Amino acid sequence: MSRKLVFLLLAAASLTPWVTAPLALVAGVVFALTWGNPFVAQSKTAQTYLLQASVVGLGAAMNLGVVLRVGASGLVQTALGLTLTLGLTFVLSKVLRTEATTSLLIGVGTAICGGSAIAAVAPAIGAKPYQTSVALAVVFLLNAAALLIFPPIGHAVHLDAPSFGLWSALAIHDTSSVVGASAQFGEAALAVGTTVKLARALWIIPLTLVLSRLWKRPEDAVGAGKPKRPWFILGFVAVAAVVTWVPGLEAPGKWLATLARQVLVLTLFLVGAGVSREALRQVGVRPIVLGVTLWLVVATATLAAIHAGWLVAPVLQP
């Protein structure tokens, strides 16, 4: 079987519900390191457009009214948490001497919403495929760990359901893993965790807009010197608004969001397929140390704040 045919079959498989995002990313990396990507240029072009389309489609799963209300109630805490996390990322990147762009992507993924935030920010700052792949791999690794260890910790420290949902939303990277962990604590935890996480996702918009203007893009990035405005983030909000406030669109919105999540899986396969041995040698293990350290600090600090009563789960109104 030819290399090109295997690549196309793996890409097609990424669009099926049986292939998860971490699996697709790993498959892309393994294929690239074993056989080499036969469609390097085409993959780079496709992943850019598919990434943007999937981010827009994910907005269809949001109830924008509830999310905005919860987001407004926790505005100061979220802004403070985002600032502290990115500040800690900067310090750790200097101490560990990790690459600036990769470090920023890991920090953004930790501070906001994991893979979705990385997917949105990466094209805005001209991140290279291997930088995006490394950041996503770190996030997915920690997502898997969180699904296993968060529920036992929550029970051990006697968190109630809403508090556990809040902790999951603040300390677990991706929405899917927040859902998986908080669901083990019941409907109340699931409702709080999902809503708070989606509210935090809105911070992708201002952060991406700011970074697209301020971050120094590499000279060899596509459109270097001409930062593109991430209009797809505004599309994300527009789709969420339409689905929320136009009667009858809730069911189609869920279908669109499901499709978008699967397109994102395909995109991650293409991102993984952009990795090379040379790029991995340049990266090393330091980004993993950075990501794990950030995660442990954020998880511990937020849990302590919830226990002390400084952070309180929102009351969700119908």
Image (cartoon, rainbow, N blue to C red):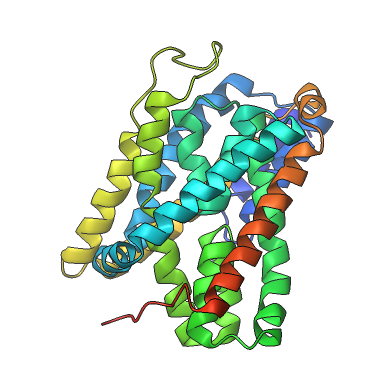
Q: Decide which of 63, 69 is in the foreground and name it.
A: 69
Position of residue 28 in the picture relative to residue 162 (left or right): right
Q: How far across and how far down the image is residue 195, in percent?
A: 39, 70
**219 lies above or below 142:** above
Depth check, front residue: 8 or 201:
201
User: Between 167 and 270, which is closer to the camera in this rendering?
Assistant: 167
Q: Residue drawn at (70%, 62%), measured in percent from left and top?
A: 144
Quadrant in the picture for residue 52? top left
Q: Tell me residue 210's x, y (percent).
A: 37, 33
Quadrant housing the N terminus: top right
Residue 221 seen in render: yes
Name the residue: 44% across, 54% down: 80
Point out residue 307 in the picture as x, y percentages from the top left corner: 57, 79
| Residue 94 position in % (x across, y down) | 69, 31
* Residue 269 seen in render: no
Count numbered badges in the picture.
0
* Residue at point 61%, 59% (across, down): 298
Q: Is residue 225 left or right of residue 315?
A: right
153 versus 196 height, above or below: below
Please tell me which residue lies in front, 50 or 307. 307
Q: Farthest residue in the left direction? A: 246
Image quadrant in which the C terminus is located: bottom left
